[in-house]
Image (cartoon, helix red, strand yellow):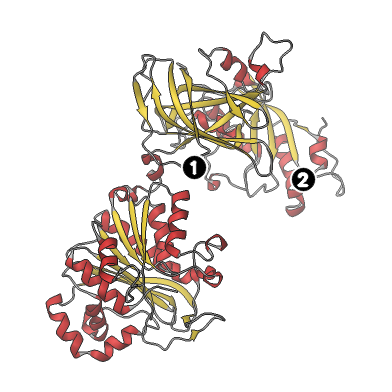
């Protein structure tokens, strides 16, 4: 170690001092003013990084600290570490390396005008003494354990379980899969706790969620292991002093070791589970699990053998994946898991909406379309080359089964307006199968005739309809919620003609669209981008969530008009909402028949049963 470096311009200095010349010396001057002489790591400085070690006085104590300045300093904060575990506080630090939480995670809490001495004067004592002014953020111990976990491996639990009061130790059954990593060649272990038994063999918790992609298929196996409970919080020990972060001591205290199971490369595994109390939210005590997997040759688990090689111990990341865990970041979607939705048209509008509905946890999706994914579709379709040559409905269903398995997807491959003699499967059989027993119908076909047909069927079943489509030039679009007997697509056409309605069509609604025929394609299609069209899909998702949350008045239909270009043709994003109190459906037929030309204009918006 050495003291402050010479001030020559060509001497080693941090990378950030080249962007902010003089900042390095300014930082050292701040230490000098505080009467602190930090030691500088010369190897780190030679590589352009500043690493300081020093003692900071608090009362009659001198606290051993280490400050490391990132390359992004002073835009982003330096890291300050306690280097002696004897000074570790109860909160606001990482038990792995003593990294102190002097500021909250919000980068605005750090000022680039501060030096490390000023940061310490302002924050150190409060952090060490658990001062009253802190970010309202809990410190779950699993965060630290997970930082040490085996890459790509995990075990799923449910935060709704409450097991600290049950009789321990007990047993638990897990479904698991093991594979070799594509790049590392090391094993990847994925599991879910299916149920937990107490010491008397009584089931005290069970998994009710869906299975992720890694735990689907014939490769999934089951094991039963022992779990133990700790009365105190389990924290890893500082890795600077103990490379095993305290696992040896923990494993030596376990009871009834679990049975061995097969791992790749002729290795055996033994899984251990520990339940312990921890802070799960700010000032709220809860519980967490620690899963440790020992892996080695078979002889490693039999200490009586001659000179056995001890097994390696790995942390398996604890992940929370219960129903409440999955919706906790978006409570507005909490009611969607019990809802069933029919969606017609899985093109550039319907497909991203389908995925958003599954992402938001809709319980059931029923799709209808007959189109096939072609490579050219990829530019405005949410799934890439893995879907080429497949029907859009099945490609979406398989994607959702892997990524959002809580949503059940069924589909009908049928083009409305056609008839297949071989199956005698007509339009109304397809409509009945798709719309039966759903809570909401969505039309993404962008075809006026098809929209009218679907609206008739939805209304006859007293189901609301959401229709979404872009203007022919894709300069704007509409998302409309039609309540049964409270308006319809033809009512909207009339409202556009009536200036008193206050409802304006989107930009380009009645403009001639430039159609293109891609090479090898049997029909023309519109020209437009996914990032514009997706705005309509996202707005439709907002309408769905608001409808089921009660945020949309159900006494009238609602029309949302979106514009993607301003009057000068420049890209923009804006939308308007209008309550659509339109004429009753009883008067629609005569109005529509008397206004044939407007109907013809409306038919020009799309063309086919499905969106391209």
Of 227 and 97, which appears nearest the observer? 227
Quadrant position of the N terminus in the picture: top right
Name the residue that disc number 2 marks: 14
Dot 1 lies on which element? loop
Dot 2 lies on which element? loop
Establish if 536 lies above or below 169: below
Q: Residue at x 50, y 40 (%)?
A: 218
Q: Nearer the viewer, mark 1 or mark 2?
A: 1
Q: Quadrant of residue 116?
A: top right
The label number, if any, that marks residue 217 in the structure image: 1
Instruction: Answer whether residue 579 is visible to the viewer in this image.
Output: no
Establish if 57 lies above or below 594: above
Please state the total of marks drawn on the protein image.
Answer: 2
Quadrant position of the C terminus in the picture: bottom left
Q: Residue at x 54, y 48 (%)?
A: 108
Question: Where is residue 505 shown, x and y percent of the image?
Answer: 32, 80
Q: Residue furthest top?
A: 304
């Amino acid at each position: 170690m050495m003291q402050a470096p010479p001030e020559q311009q060509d001497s080693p200095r941090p990378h950030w001092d080249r962007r902010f010349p003089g900042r390095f010396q300014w930082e050292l001057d701040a230490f000098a003013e505080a009467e602190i002489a930090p030691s500088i790591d010369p190897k780190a400085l030679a590589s352009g990084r500043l690493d300081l070690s020093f003692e900071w006085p608090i009362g009659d104590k001198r606290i051993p600290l280490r400050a490391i300045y990132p390359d992004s300093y002073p835009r982003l904060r330096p890291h300050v570490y306690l280097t002696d575990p004897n000074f570790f506080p109860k909160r606001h630090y990482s038990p792995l390396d003593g990294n102190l939480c002097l500021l909250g995670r919000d980068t605005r809490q750090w000022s680039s005008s501060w030096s490390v001495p000023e940061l310490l004067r302002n924050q150190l004592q409060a952090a060490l003494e658990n001062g009253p002014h802190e970010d309202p953020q809990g410190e779950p111990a699993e965060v630290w354990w997970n930082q040490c976990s085996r890459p790509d491996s995990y075990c799923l639990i449910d935060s709704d379980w409450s097991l600290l009061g049950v009789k321990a130790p007990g047993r638990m059954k897990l479904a698991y899969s093991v594979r070799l990593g594509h790049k590392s060649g090391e094993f990847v272990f994925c599991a879910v706790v299916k149920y937990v038994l107490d010491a008397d063999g009584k089931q005290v918790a069970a998994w009710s969620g869906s299975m992720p992609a890694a735990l689907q298929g014939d490769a999934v196996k089951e094991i039963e292991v022992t779990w133990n409970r700790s009365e105190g919080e389990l924290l890893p020990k500082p890795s600077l002093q103990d490379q095993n972060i305290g696992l040896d001591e923990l494993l030596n205290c376990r009871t009834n070791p679990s049975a061995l199971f097969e791992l790749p490369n002729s290795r055996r595994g033994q899984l251990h589970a520990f339940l312990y109390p921890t802070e799960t939210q700010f000032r709220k005590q809860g519980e967490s699990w620690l899963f440790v997997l020992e892996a080695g040759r078979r002889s490693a688990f039999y200490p009586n053998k001659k000179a056995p090689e001890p097994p390696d111990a790995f942390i398996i990341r604890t992940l929370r994946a219960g129903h409440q865990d999955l919706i906790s970041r978006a409570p507005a979607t909490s009611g969607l898991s019990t809802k069933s939705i029919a969606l017609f048209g899985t093109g550039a509008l319907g497909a991203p909406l389908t995925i958003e509905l599954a992402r938001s946890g809709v319980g059931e999706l029923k799709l209808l379309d007959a189109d096939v994914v072609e490579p050219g579709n990829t530019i405005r379709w949410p799934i890439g080359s893995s879907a080429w040559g497949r029907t859009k409905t099945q490609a979406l269903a398989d994607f959702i089964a892997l990524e959002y398995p809580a949503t059940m997807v069924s589909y009908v491959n049928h083009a409305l307006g056609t008839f297949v003699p071989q199956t005698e499967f007509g339009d109304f059989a397809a409509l009945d199968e798709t719309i039966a027993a759903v809570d909401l119908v969505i039309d993404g076909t962008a075809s006026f005739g098809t929209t009218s047909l679907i609206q008739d069927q939805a209304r006859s079943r007293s189901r609301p309809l959401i229709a979404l489509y872009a203007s022919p030039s894709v300069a704007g679009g509409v998302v409309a919620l039609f309540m049964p007997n409270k308006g319809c697509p033809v009512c909207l056409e009339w409202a556009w003609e009536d200036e008193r309605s206050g409802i304006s069509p989107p930009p380009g609604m009645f403009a001639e669209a430039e159609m293109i025929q891609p090479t090898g394609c049997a029909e023309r299609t519109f020209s437009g981008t996914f990032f514009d069209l997706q705005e309509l899909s996202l707005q439709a998702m907002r309408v769905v969530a608001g409808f089921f949350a009660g945020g949309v008045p159900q006494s009238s239909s609602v029309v949302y008009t979106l514009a993607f270009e301003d009057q000068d043709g420049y890209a923009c994003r804006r939308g308007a909402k209008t309550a659509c109190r339109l004429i009753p459906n009883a008067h629609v037929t005569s109005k529509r028949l008397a206004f044939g030309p407007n109907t013809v204009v409306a038919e020009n918006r799309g063309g086919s049963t499905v969106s391209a």
